[in-house]
Image: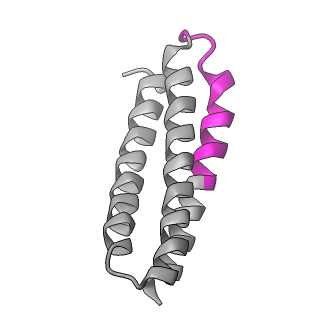
Amino acid sequence: MSKKEAYKQKIEAELELAQAKVAEYKAKSKIYAADVHIKYVEHVDELERMYDATKAKLKELDEAGEEKWEHFKDDVESAWNALSIAVKDAAEKFKK
């Protein structure tokens, strides 16, 4: 397995976990009161946008040739780190 493929598989696995959390938060949003529900939904929508952006960056990396994929790695890492932090922050907010 190439370094590119191993990296891609790692990020895809992490994205699956993040997607599961986003789906969980989306489901929980349905049980909150209307005022809290709106804020919750807005936050979940932002997480979904970040998830989609990370998937798009990963697709760019995947479509890059073996010799160029590392040029896209920083963008993927940056998008993933932002999403990961946002998911963790959401977990803290939604516990309350």
Residue visible at 35% across and 48% down in the picture: 16
Q: Where's residue 64, x and y in %?
A: 56, 13
Vertical placement of residue 91 versus 78, above or below: below
Residue visible at 44% across and 85% down in the picture: 95
Q: Nearer the viewer, residue 80 or 7?
A: 80
Q: Which quadrant of the structure image shows residue 61?
A: top right
Name the magenta segment's main secondary structure. Answer: helix
Q: Where's residue 85, x and y in %?
A: 59, 63
Answer with left or right where residue 21 lies relative to residue 73: left
Which residues, given as a range, are shown in magenta?
65-82
Quarter of the image that includes the N terminus: top left
Q: How is the image coloured?
A: one colour
Q: Nearer the viewer, residue 33 or 69?
A: 33
**Residue lying farthest to the bottom in this orientation:** 96
Q: Where's residue 34, x and y in %?
A: 45, 81
Answer with left or right where residue 49 lies relative to residue 2: right
Decide whether residue 9 is among the magenta residues: no
Q: How many marks?
A: 0
Q: Which quadrant of the structure image shows residue 32?
A: bottom left
Vertical placement of residue 33 versus 86, above or below: below
Residue visible at 45% across and 41% down in the picture: 11
Q: Which quadrant of the structure image shows residue 6?
A: top left
Vertical placement of residue 74 versus 64, above or below: below
Q: Where's residue 75, x and y in %?
A: 67, 35
Residue visible at 33% across and 73% down in the picture: 30
